[in-house]
Amino acid sequence: MRQAKEPLSAGAVLGWLVLAALAPGSAHLRAGWRRTGLVLLSCYAVLLLALLAFVLTNDLGNLIGSATQDATLAALMFGAIALGVAWFALIVHSFVVLRPGRLAQSQQILTGTLAGLLAVVVVVPFGFAAQTASTSRQALDNIFQAPENEGEPPAPEPKPEDPWAGRDRVNILLLGGDADDNRVGVRTDSMNLASIDVKTGNTVLFSLPRNLEDVRFRPGTPMARRFPNGFDLPKDPGGGASDLLNSVWEYADAHPELFDGRKNQGPKVLMDTIGYTLGLKVDWYALVNMWGFARLIDAIGGVTITVEQDVVFGKYNEGLVKAGTRKLKGADAMWYARSRTYSDDYTRMRRQRCVLGALLDQADPATVLTRFNQVALATKELIRTDIPRTWLQHLVPLALKVKDAKVTSVQFVPPLINTGYPDWEKIRQIAAKAIEDSTRTKAAVAASASPSSSVSPSPKKSRKTGDDPTKGLTEGCGTSSTKG
C-alpha cells in the first residue's frame, strides 16, 4: 500500500470519485492503493462479463419468466441491497484514500458534502431494483393464489424439458366482471377465450356474447343433469333473464348443492361450459375487474384509440367519449369498451376487441418496465385467476411470442350466430377452422388488415367464399391501434 505523492485539487477528488462510481478501484489506483484497486477493477470486470454472457446465452423471454419465481425475486432483492451497501462503502472509502484532509477547509467541506451526495445517489438504482423486486413478489402473491374450488387436486407441476406436455395450444379464458359492493355474485359481462399456439404464439381470440341463451353443458356434469335441455330459468321479477351465459358463474356459486356441497364452483363450471361450447379444453381463466382495468390503463400512461363516433355513457347519459383519435385515460377507455347507451352488446364487444388490440400494441415491455410500480399496484386489484404461480415462468415467454405473432378474432354475434337460438355445431366448426388457419399461418403480424381464408361450409348451411368471421384483432378499429 503506497500513498500518492502529490496532493489533489477539489475538482480532481470529485472527478476520481465519479470515475470510481463507474469503475470501482480507479480512485484507489490514483491514490497509490494498487493491489486494492486492481482487485476491485478485476472483480468488476468479471462481474460485467459474467452478466453479459448470462444475458447473451439465455432467451429474453426465459429470463423474464424466471424473474417471476419467488426465489429469483428474493435473490434479486437481497442482491440489490447488498450491492447498494457495497457501492456506498466504495464511494466512502475512495473518498478517504484520496486524502481530502490535505485540501483547504472550505474545499474539504465542499468535497465532503458532494461525496456524501454521490454516495447516496449511487445507492438509488439498487434501492429501486430492490423495491421493484419486492413489489413484484407482493403483486404476484396477491394475484396467483391457490384456487378457491373446493375438492380440486393441485395443478400438476410443469416439466422444465417440456412444460406443455406435448400440447400444441394453451387456452386461457379472459373474463371481465363488474365487481361492486352493491352487487352479489360475479357476472361475467365480457368473455373471450384466447387460444395460443405454443410454438408460434399465433392466437385466436373467441368472443362470446353475454346474452347467449339456451346454454348447453357438457353431458354428465351436474349442470347438465340440472338443465338437460339447456340453461333455462324463470324470468326475474322485473322481466330480466338470469339464465344467460354471463350468469353461469353466478348460478354455480349460488348452488353448491348441485356439486355435493362444494363451494366456489363458478369458475370451473364456466370454463367447462365455454370449452364445451367451442369444442376446446380451457386450461385457466383470468377474471378482470373493470375498474381495476381502468387503473391498469392509467398505470401505463393511457391508451391511444380511434373512437369512430361519440360514445355516451353514465346512468343519466351524462358522460361522453368524443369521436377522434386520442390517448384515453383509464376511465374513458373503460366506458368506451363497456357502454351500451344508444348501442348494443355486439357493438360493445367490437369496442372491447379494439381496446384489447390497442393494449397489445402499445403496452410494450419498455413501457411496462418504466412504469412497473404503478402497473404492479394496479394489477393487485385487477386480476383473479387460477393460473398456478409455477407456470408463470413458461407463460411469460409465451406472452412475448403473442406480442409479435398473428392475433385474429372471431365474434359469435348476429348475423353469424343467433344468440337466442344458437347453432352449437356451427360454433364448434367455426372455432375449429379458425384454429386450423391460425396454425397454418407462419407470418408474424399483430393484426391482419383483411379476413383470412373462408371457413369450411357447414353440412347444413352453405357459406359464400370470403364470408369469413375470422378478423384481425384490430380490424375496423382505426389506424391508431393497428400494427403495420
Image (cartoon, rainbow, N blue to C red):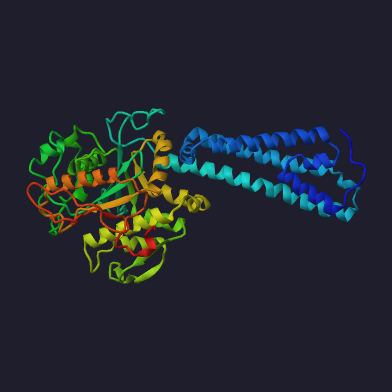
Quarter where residue 261 is shown: top left
Relative to 149, residue 240 above or below: below
- Do we see residue 299 in this rendering? yes
Position of the C terminus, as image quadrant, is bottom left
Q: How many marks?
A: 0
Q: Nearer the viewer, residue 13 or 61?
A: 61
Q: Position of residue 223 (x, y in %)?
A: 15, 39
User: Which residue is located at x 30 percent, y 36 percent?
Assistant: 168
Residue located 24% across and 53% down the image: 470
Q: Is residue 482 above or below residue 286?
A: below
443 left or right, relative to 373: left
Is 164 positioned to the left or the right of 262 in the image? right
Residue 122, horizontal then vertical, whole percent: 68, 47
Quadrant of the snapshot with the N terminus:
top right
In the rendered image, residue 446, in percent from the top left (x then y), is placed at 36, 53
Point 77% across, 47% down: residue: 17
Residue 17 falls left or right of residue 433:
right
As drawn, the residue found furthest toward the right would be 5
Residue 436 image offset from top left, x and y in percent? 24, 43
Examine the rendering and report whether any part of residue 295 can be seen: no
329 left or right of 476? right
